Amino acid sequence: MCELKRIIAREIRNAGPISIARYMEICMHNEEYGYYSKKNPIGAEGDFITSPEISQMFGELIGLWLIQVWLEHGAPKPFSLIELGPGRGTLMADILRSSSIIPSFKLNASIILLEKSETLTIIQRKSLQGFNITWHKNIEDIDSKPLFVVANEFFDALPIRQFIKKENKCFERMINIKENEKLFFCLQEIDLAESHRLPFYFIERDKVFETCEQTRQIVSKVSKNICAYGGAGLFIDYGHYGQQGDSLQAIFKHTYSDPLSNPGSSDLTAHVDFRAIEDIATATGARTSKLFTQGNFLTALGIDLRAKKLEKMMTTKQKINNTIAKNRLIKQDKMGHLFKVIGLTNQSAPKLPILET
Ligand code: SAH
């Protein structure tokens, strides 16, 4: 049995079944054996590949969108440019490169990366060499300044809890262990006080309903600061709008696997509920945009033009690869439809380009 499984088994045997959130926390962030602590999971050699790793066009276009928003907001100075969960640092590097057209953007930005993994922090330090960057592990530590925030495939990585309503009782889906050391899901009735904090009216019987406490904390803090000091946020992730059902998934070496197998070695994620993000942000007084698909957003930002411009300097083979990468980002059957984009800003801010026009 691997070390991480031993840690999980010990915790369950000592204190009883653990929540899915606790399981995800141990699997992803255990300091010695957690998924993000051990190696670099992102990219062709890792378990999954993200949009900024597929093509530089992704980060460049997001960068131009952010600069446009910053300009339309009156180019506030100084301001924080924040990325949540920056992985290898590729998206931020592409944003900063594309910002060269408006030098005052980079000059006045305090760059902040919210990152929990020491391993990935080291990689980000290398990708972003030469920039003055502050790393935070806790969103509560961000400054009281205008903030422009971006996150790609961040919220899907945060630990979720799952609940099921049966008759008039509510249960949490927990993880237990058998005599033979096999992990399995079980249901544990939750107390009435806790069930009242869930949108009971909304939960359909026998369907899984997912919540994410860290998403609540982070979106709430970011939205409050945007309301108080100005700025905007752009969140991109795969997900849905208020659907119910079990979306916990594990990716092991680029293929789906059982979330309870290979703890610490497979990437555990859940689909992001953009309705929950919208509810959390609007409860603080922020304004959210409508939900766009990644395909529509990147197309509206001019990915076709950008691809053509890049292709002028490319060999035939590079051109083919560039088209493949572009299609991967925007086509319905690839990342174009499942991946969604939402923007947020404060009530008095101008309309967000593309997302609110
Ligand atoms: N945005 C990147 C990486 C996505 S992977 C990309 O598009 O390539 C998820 C990232 O979020 C990793 O950098 C991971 O270490 C970080 N992360 C996960 N949980 C976190 C948490 N609770 N706080 C801060 N960072 C976290």
Image: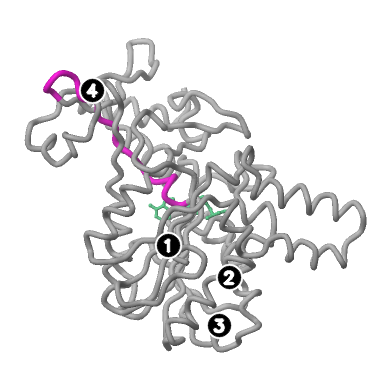
Which comes before the other along the chain, label 3 or label 4?
3
Say which element carries label 2. Answer: helix
Residue 101 drawn in magenta? no
Q: Which residue is drawn at 11% across and 22% down?
A: 168
Image quadrant where residue 10 sits: top left
Which comes before the other along the chain, label 4 or label 2?
2
Residue type at numbered disc 1: Gly
Q: Position of residue 225 (x, y in %)?
A: 29, 72
Taking 235 as reference, is 218 left or right? Answer: left
Q: Which residue is drawn at 55% across and 82% down?
A: 106
What residue did someone put label 3 on? 106
Report the Cα–Cα distance between label 3 and label 4.
51 Å
Report the Cα–Cα distance between label 1 and label 2.
14 Å
Residue type at numbered disc 3: Lys
Furthest residue toward left: 193
Label 4: few (<14), some or many (≥20) within 10 Å?
A: some
Q: Position of residue 147 (x, y in %)?
A: 39, 75
What residue did someone put label 2 on? 63
Q: Give the range drawn in magenta.
A: 154-169
Which comes before the other along the chain, label 1 or label 4?
4
